Every structure is written in C-alpha cells, then in structure tokens.
Image: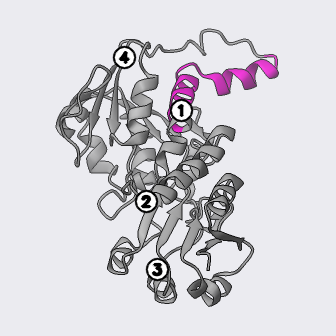
Amino acid sequence: MKPKVIFIDSVHPILFERLEKSGYECHWRQELSRDEVLSILPNYQGAVIRSKFKFDAAVFEKSTHLKWIARSGAGMENIDHILAAQKNIQLFNSPEGNRDAVAEHCLTTILGLFNHLKRSDTEVRNAEWNREKNRGLELKGKTVGLLGYGFMGQAFAERLIGFGVNTIAYDKYKTDYSSDIVQEVSLKQLQRQVDILSIHLPLTEETQFMVNAEFIQQFKKSFYLINTARGKNVETQALVDALKSGKVKGACLDVLEYEKTSFEALKQEDLPEVFQYLSRSDKVILTPHVAGWTQESYFKLSDVLADKILTKSKPISF
C-alpha cells in the first residue's frame, strides 16, 4: 500500500507531482474545514501545510500514522515541536526556497524608502515637481545590522555586496560565521553601530515583541528598520513612538503585528490608531507579507520540500 499524503494548504504542484512519482499517494484537501481534516488525518502518513493550519495537541492526537509534516516556507510556529518530537514525526521546512525573494525585497524597500519612490511617484502623477523635497540617501557608507543570521539574513548580506556598506550580524544561536560579507558582533555592538536594522528571526516566545521600547532605546544612533520576518517580532506601539521621536528614522514593514495567523489578511478588529499612523506616514513602506512571495519562490519552496522529504536527510532549520 502506498503511503498517503494530505495537502491541507495549497502549494506549487511540483511537490505533489514529485511525491506521486516517488510512490506516494497524494490528495489535495485544502477545501476541508479543520474538523473535516481531523476526521481523515488518521489515514495519512504525510501532511503538507503552509501557515493557516495549526498542528496543536488536538491535531497530533488524530495523527496516529503521521510520519512527517512539511511546511512550505520558513516559519514553524504553527507546529508544536515538542509533540512532534514525542511522536517521532519529522518536520521539514523550506527557507532555502524564498531566501532570495526575501533578500531582494529587503533591498528593494530600503532603496525605495531612501529615495522617496512612493511619495515622489505620487507627486509626479499629480503634476507636482518637488526635487529638493525628494532628495535621497545612499546606502554606501552605512552600517546594516542583521538581527538573526539564518538563510534570510545570509541572503540579504549577499545582496548587499557591491553597495559599499558595512554588514554586521547578531545571532544568539550561532558563532564563528564572520566572512568576507559579514562581521559577527554582539547584540550591544549591533545596537551601537547600525544605521539600518533588518530583522530575520523566527517567531518564538523569546522573540515575540523582542523589538520593544527598551530594545529600541539601546541603539546609540537613530536608525532605519526593515522587518520581513514576523509581525510580532516588533511591538507596533514602540515602533510608532520611536518614529515620532525620530529614534527610528523610517521603516519597511512587510509583516505586521495585526496579521491573522494565516498571514492572509489583517485582523480588522485589531487595527488601532498606531496602525493608522503607519498607514499615513511617508517614513514607512508597507507591503502585505509578500517578501518571499515571488513567481520563482512559489516553485522553489515546494521543490526544496520534495528534496528533503525524499531524502529525509536534512534537519529542520530556520
């Protein structure tokens, strides 16, 4: 009997196709409700998800034959890792699939912010010709600090080659990674040196609202903030206060504290005045959690998962 795989979320069909060719029986079931998924989950040995479906205690109780869970993307906060380990269920993710997309998005948004592209485009379309008002900044000579140096942080560091910047990184769980493209530093050194801070963290109890008022005040200089990781890495009220005071000069936010857990929409009922400030500010660029959401990454995210599932040799990573 072929092992069965349930596709609870939609992903690029290359994963479905490669698994089927390798002897799996795959079923698209993304239209089912949570309760409907639970009712049939005991029939499956593999599960493919993105972000909307949460593997909690109730789901693991029904996962009587599950051998692995594959998450298309990097973040794994919707899976209870402890329960997975207790049940000997392997976990796979695919940060390699969208690392390039995230890195390019970071570069795009900071250049857009530095050069007032959003504002100046709107003004010219309205027949306003404000050259001095839209005088830009150059990346060259700036210090870019990476908070987290996993796949995404490394990819951004690679993209910064050639811009004449000083790239530094702090990662609590890594050491000895200094190279030609990045210098490893302590958190205090990062906070002392940066002109631009780019966040590349998973969402855990430790990193939730890590960037808060106290954290921001530890920076020696005013700085720019890029967040393409998770919205709840940053406390929005603290960010807005820092934007108002000038401690944060500007922000590029692809993720927001107020996103639904599925990352598919904002929670309208949870949009406070601080969000309205962000939406009105020309110091802020907002995008709808699309940093890793390119035509190319859509394919690569699933292709990488297929490689990992079929070899079962690569550990989970962030």
Disc 3 packing (10 Å; few <14; some 14–19; many ≥20): some
Query: Which mark lies nearer to you, 3 or 4?
Result: 3
Say which label, 3 or 4, has the lower sequence index.
3
Q: Which kind of residue does numbered mark 3 sit on?
A: Asp
Q: Which residues are magenta?
A: 102-127
Q: Image quarter for residue 19?
A: bottom right
Q: Secondary structure at mark 1?
A: loop
Query: Disc 3 or disc 1, which is closer to the eye?
Result: 3
- Crowdedness of circle 2 by 10 Å Cα count: few (<14), some, many (20+)? some
Residue matched to label 2? 312
Counting from the top left corner in percent of width and height, residue 292 is at 57, 43
Q: What kind of residue is marked 1?
A: Lys
Please tell me the numbered disc located at residue 165.
4
Q: Mark 3 falls on what kind of element?
A: loop
Residue depicted at x 71% and y 55%: 13
User: Is residue 234 on the magenta stretch?
Assistant: no
Residue under the point 19% across and 40% down: 175
Image quadrant holding the N terminus, namely bottom right
Image vertical order of residue 111 relative to residue 129, above or below: below
Q: Nearer the viewer, residue 146 or 135?
A: 146
Q: Earlier in the sequence, mark 3 or mark 1?
A: 3
Q: Is residue 82 above or below residue 267?
A: below
> Can you identify the residue that label 1 sits on?
283
How many angstroms separate mark 2 from mark 4 (CA)? 39 Å
Q: Nearer the viewer, mark 1 or mark 4?
A: 4
Name the residue tied to disc 3. Answer: 56
Question: In the rendering, at what x and y percent does residue 291 appear?
Answer: 57, 41
